[in-house]
Image (cartoon, rainbow, N blue to C red):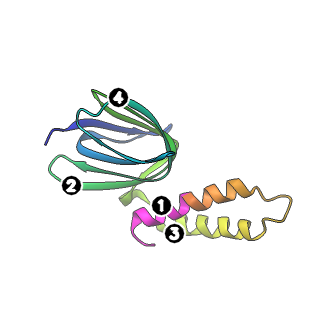
Amino acid sequence: MATFQLDIVTPEKTVYSGNVNSLQAPGVDGGFGVLSRHQPMLAALAIGQVAFVETGGHSRKLAMSGGFANVSRDGVIVLAETAELTEEIDVNRARASRDRAQARLARKGDADVDVERARASLMRAMWRLRVAGVE
């Protein structure tokens, strides 16, 4: 199977760089897949799971909290706000974040609660837990 270069970067670091067979990503308009020689495109990414298959058939996943994917003839560059590979996810921290967001949402009538921010925090935490395979 033909491969392409995948680079996943955040403002802090390069999370992944290597050749892959395929990529699945959560676009804001719906999930999409990329194979080698995909038509060039630019896509806004949502909070969710990115999955890819490395050369040799090893599947990998990561949790991301939005960004952009630039698909070109040379490969794919994912510019993510945050991204964590499965093995990097701190499950206890993700659970604590989920619990804090749920507590804030329970108080959504309070003037000091930013409901949209709490919902986004809850979504990020739930995706981190789902990608880690614990919930």
Q: Amino acid at mark 3?
A: Asn
Q: CA distance from mark 2 to mark 4?
A: 25 Å
Left or right: residue 109 versus residue 123 is right
- Judge whether residue 130 is colored magenta: yes
Where in the figure is residue 4, as x and y percent of width and height? 23, 36
Q: CA distance from mark 1 to mark 4?
A: 29 Å
Q: CA distance from mark 3 to mark 2?
A: 26 Å
Residue 90 visible, this orientation: no
Q: Amino acid at mark 4?
A: Pro
Return the residue nearer the eye: 86 or 12.
86
Where in the figure is residue 69, as x and y percent of width and height? 42, 36
Q: Amino acid at mark 1?
A: Arg
Q: Which residue is mark 1?
A: 128
Q: Earlier in the sequence, mark 2 or mark 4?
A: 4
Left or right: residue 99 versus residue 21 is right
Q: Which residue is mark 4?
A: 40
Depth check, mark 2 against mark 4: the one in front is 4
- Judge whether residue 102 is colored magenta: no
Q: CA distance from mark 1 to mark 3?
A: 11 Å
| Picture residue at 28% right of the left edge, 27% below the top | 73
Depth check, mark 4 against mark 3: the one in front is 4
Q: Secondary structure at mark 4?
A: loop
- For mark 3, does the 10 Å Cα neighbourhood hold few (<14), some (14 to 19), or many (20 or more) residues? few
Asked if residue 114 is positioned above or below residue 21 in the image, the reply reads below
